[in-house]
Amino acid sequence: MLKKLSFVIFFLAGMTSFAQRTEFGIKGGLNFSNLAGDASSEFEWVTSFHIGGLVEFQVNDFLSIQPEAQYSLQGFGFTNDENVSIGYVNIPVLAKFYLGGKNFSLEAGPQFGIKVSSKYDFDGGSADIEEGLNNFDFSGVLGASYEFDNNLFFSARYIAGYTNVIEKEAFAGEDASTPNSVFQFSVGYKFQ
């Protein structure tokens, strides 16, 4: 996982040499997350947040590459108002395809996540989770953005996890599929 992340960083560093324009930005917003897969019926959606920064490298008038770094609080709930909150540092690397000008774009690409915190929230308190959750997350991202002429933008994404959040041993030894499933809505601003 770290080799893949290192490759992405070196790749992006080299991109600045051929980018027509480079923009920096900040963003934040809401997450609606749950687990997908075999055990998804056992869990409920939870609402949380994300915040971070981005760099957009314009390749041509129709294509940009946009790596981001964000803190994203994700997780899943139970029917008894208890939930698991997992904090990730996520690095999405997105290809942005502009349609009909510079305002509207479709975006897609991989996302690499590193778990930095996890806790179990219950009635009357919370407890850190030390075991049973994977430390890394690999996902695919598909979304759309609209940027106004004043550099303010809105985006909506679906993030489909490919790795299990819950380790097999923590799920009573069953080989259940438990990847992340996240709908993400953001507002942000780009500096030129």
Image (cartoon, grey):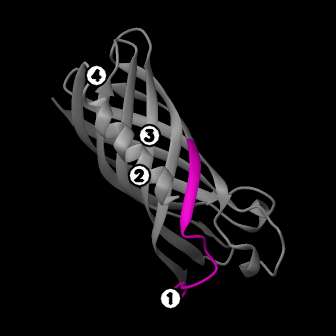
Q: Which one is earlier in the sequence, the residue at label 4 or at label 2?
A: 2
> Which residue in the structure is indicated by mark 3?
93
Q: Which residue is mark 2?
A: 6
Marked residue nearer the N-terminal end (1 or 4) = 4
- The label shown at residue 127 is 1
Q: Categorize mark 4 by other alpha carbons within 10 Å: few (<14), some (14-19), many (20+).
A: few
- Secondary structure found at label 3: strand
Q: Earlier in the sequence, mark 4 or mark 3?
A: 4
Kindly identify the amino acid type of the residue bearing the numbered disc 3. Answer: Val
> Which image quadrant is residue 88 in?
bottom left
Q: First in sequence, mark 3 or 2: give its number.
A: 2
At 24% from the left and 39% from the top, the residue drawn is 25
Q: Foreground: 11 or 55?
A: 11
Measured in 3D between alpha carbons, the distance from the residue under mark 3 to the one under mark 2, in whole angstroms, is 13 Å
How far across and how far down the image is residue 55, in percent? 28, 37
Residue furthest to the right in view is 174
